[in-house]
């Protein structure tokens, strides 16, 4: 609706000419009756552009009494500022048009006008007849329809902007701007409430309200909004200091989604009335729902993106080779850590068949299923080798669908070697346990049969020796188990190492004496103080000295020396035996490991002695290393923390 009276010259008015003198105003009673009873609003205007009369409908339309209207200039109702406008009226240049009339109470009324000039018998203008029709309802409907169409346009733009835009964060302020113009507010904002504090997320403010403080306007109402976060909140008459609009109204609508609340949509109205039509409120609510759905979509996408990134990181971090294949063995996807022995560029792998890359028999074992028409169950192939690769591999096939499967290929070289070591250990341990047990049973049977005193004494000596040998092996197994489970704790404290070394030599001297091997101890001082534990260090040096004796040829010697190096005491045990192959040294302290030359020489042993030695030395905070040369001998260096007599 226009907010001012529009000049008559602004309309095109139809001129209806009456040339019969019988149509003069007041010419007869029939005309007057028709004038009063017609449903149209009729105004009679003189050539001086003052009202002559009007029927009751016209008077009611403008709120005047007839006496008040008669003689009133037309310009008070409809502006006619200059003579050209009046001349245009008299020269019949105007037609039916829409205009706005000012009522007695100064309110404006949209009307449709039909103006005609009535002529006298001489063909000269006598007066002007103006018919007016109230079109306020139609205008209201048109405005409502226009606003409804604008609302639909906002919803359409919001839908396109939020769900087609590659960047939802940039689209939301544009949607808020469109919504603000559609419902005639000066500010729209998205915000959230955390611990009674407001977090503004997105906003649009009209340029006329630049500098408007959204947080300050909403702060007094945060508690009320937070108490009912699922209900619409509205307030009028809010006074804002230092604002372009001193009094405003606020509408807050919650934004909900399937994953919970996303916050609130706030609208700020400068008219201080919150007088939105139903379809406008529906527009606001629909826009809020669309924003909630878009934010939910954004969170879903972010969740999916993070999940995909997490899965990719996990997959890339896996040491395994991953192959996705179809039933024919064609590789559909591929991922491998560059450190994997079978790593190859993707372009050389994807699209090729597994049978082309690996031996057909290996590919057949991996792809073989109960039904050659579908992948139905997981399949495991353990311990296979590939040409030009020294490693041992395993492959696990897991169906993704009946036509696709994921194959995980793992390098199990170390595991296979450990399995072999365990198997060898079981065989050796069984042999080591069975041999003294067999000898002990034999000695027992011989003792039962009797014999000379010398024979019986020899039987007893062998029986005790074999039982001690079996006991030692069992003790080592138990000790290894305690170390493995972490149940063995050593309390390192200052101690003199010399008694431990002397007792360890004494424990092995009898075995060395049988093969004429001498054990020599050289030390610079009478006492060697270290951080240690007597029982643990006894295990260490008995094992090392016993190994030196066991691997030395008859008639040779084993030398022990101590020396100080910085804040450490270095104890060296040297033999002149078989030596250790270079490739065996890195594995020497592993469980169940025995060098090949020792096995070939058929020297008895369990393969856990050096594992026990290193575990104890590590527990005491020391280190152990080895230097060896084939057929020349071996030196073990044990480094322990040096301690003073007072600790």
Image (cartoon, helix red, strand yellow):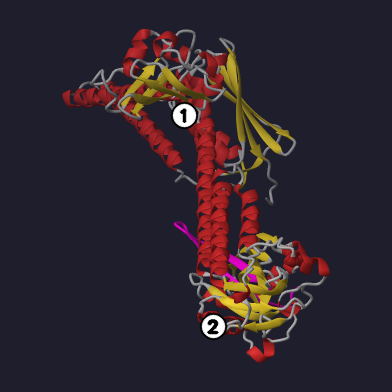
Instruction: Give me the residue at 68% from left, 86% from top.
Output: 69
| Residue 221 seen by the camera | no
Task: Residue 296 in the image: state x and y as whole percent.
Answer: 51, 53
Q: Classify 47 as above or below 92.
A: below
Q: Nearer the viewer, residue 244 or 221?
A: 244
Q: Which residue is mark 1?
A: 609
Rendered residue at 50%/48% (across/down): 300
The residue range painted magenta reads 245-272
Disc 2 target residue: 36
Q: Is residue 638 left or right of residue 423?
A: right
Residue neighbourhood size for the residue with mark 2, other residues' Cα within 10 Å, grouped as few (<14), some (14–19), many (≥20)? some
Q: Is residue 162 visible?
A: yes
Please name the predominant secondary structure of the magenta segment in the image. Answer: strand
In 3D space, how far apart are the residues under numbered discs 2 and 1 (Cα atoms)? Answer: 129 Å
Q: Where does the image place residue 104, in percent across and percent down from the top left?
A: 67, 85
**Quadrant housing residue 603:** top left
- The image position of residue 63, as x and y in percent, is 62, 86
Q: Tell me which numbered mark, 2 or 1, is placed earlier along the sequence.
A: 2
* Residue drawn at (53%, 19%) of the image: 346
């Amino acid at each position: 609706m226009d907010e001012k009276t529009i000049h008559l010259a602004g309309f095109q008015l139809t001129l209806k000419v009456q040339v019969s003198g019988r149509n003069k105003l007041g010419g007869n009673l029939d005309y007057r009756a028709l004038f009063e009873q017609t449903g149209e609003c009729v105004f009679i205007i003189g050539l001086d552009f003052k009202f002559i009369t009007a029927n009751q409908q016209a008077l009611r339309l403008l709120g005047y009494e007839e006496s008040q209207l008669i003689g009133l200039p037309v310009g008070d109702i409809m502006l006619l500022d200059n003579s050209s406008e009046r001349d245009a009226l008299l020269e019949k240049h105007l037609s039916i048009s829409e205009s706005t009339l000012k009522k007695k109470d100064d309110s404006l009324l949209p009307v449709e006008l039909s103006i005609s000039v009535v002529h006298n018998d001489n063909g000269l203008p006598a007066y002007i007849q103006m018919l007016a029709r109230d079109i306020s309802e139609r205008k209201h409907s048109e405005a409502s329809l226009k606003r409804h169409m604008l609302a639909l346009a906002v919803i359409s733009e919001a839908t396109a902007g939020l769900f087609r835009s590659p960047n939802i964060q940039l689209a939301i302020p544009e949607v808020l701007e469109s919504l603000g113009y559609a419902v005639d507010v000066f500010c729209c904002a998205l915000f959230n409430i955390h611990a009674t504090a407001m977090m503004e997320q997105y906003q649009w403010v009209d340029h006329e309200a630049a500098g408007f403080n959204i947080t300050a306007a909403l702060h007094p109402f945060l508690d009320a909004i937070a108490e009912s976060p699922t209900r619409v909140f509205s307030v009028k008459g809010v006074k804002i200091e230092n604002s372009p609009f001193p009094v405003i109204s606020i509408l807050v609508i919650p934004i909900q989604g399937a994953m919970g609340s996303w916050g609130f949509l706030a609208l700020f109205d400068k008219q201080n009335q919150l007088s939105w039509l139903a379809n406008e409120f529906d527009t606001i609510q629909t826009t809020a729902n669309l924003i909630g759905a878009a934010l939910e979509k954004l969170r879903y996408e972010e969740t999916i993106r993070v999940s995909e990134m997490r899965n990719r990181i996990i997959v890339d971090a896996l040491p395994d080779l991953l192959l996705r294949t179809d039933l024919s063995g064609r590789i559909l996807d591929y991922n491998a850590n560059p450190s994997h022995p079978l790593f190859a560029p993707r372009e050389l792998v994807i699209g090729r068949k597994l049978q082309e890359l690996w031996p057909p028999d290996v590919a057949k074992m991996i792809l073989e299923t109960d039904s050659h028409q579908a992948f139905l169950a997981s399949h495991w192939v353990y311990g296979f080798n590939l040409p030009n690769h020294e490693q041992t591999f395993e492959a696990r096939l897991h169906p993704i669908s009946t036509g696709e499967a994921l194959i995980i290929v793992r390098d199990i070289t170390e595991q296979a070697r450990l399995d072999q070591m365990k198997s060898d250990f079981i065989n050796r341990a069984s042999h080591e346990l069975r041999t003294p047990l067999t000898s002990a049973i034999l000695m027992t049977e011989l003792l039962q049969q009797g014999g000379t005193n010398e024979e019986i004494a020899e039987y007893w000596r062998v029986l005790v020796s074999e039982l001690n040998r079996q006991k030692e092996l069992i003790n080592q197994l138990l000790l290894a188990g305690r170390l493995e489970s972490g149940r063995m704790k050593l309390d390192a404290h200052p101690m003199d190492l010399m008694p431990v070394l002397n007792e360890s030599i004494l424990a092995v001297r009898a075995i060395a004496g049988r093969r004429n091997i001498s054990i020599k101890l050289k030390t610079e001082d009478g006492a060697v103080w270290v951080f240690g534990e007597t029982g643990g260090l006894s295990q260490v040096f008995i094992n090392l000295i016993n190994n030196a004796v066991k691997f030395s040829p008859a008639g040779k010697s084993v030398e022990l020396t101590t020396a100080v190096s910085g804040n450490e005491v270095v104890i060296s045990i040297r033999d002149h035996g078989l030596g250790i192959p270079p490739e065996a040294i890195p594995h020497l302290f592993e469980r169940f490991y025995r060098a090949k030359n020792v096995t070939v020489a058929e020297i008895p042993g369990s393969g856990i002695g050096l594992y026990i030695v290193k575990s104890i030395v590590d527990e005491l905070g020391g280190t152990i290393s080895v230097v060896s040369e084939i057929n020349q001998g071996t030196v073990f260096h044990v480094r322990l923390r040096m301690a003073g007599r007072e600790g």
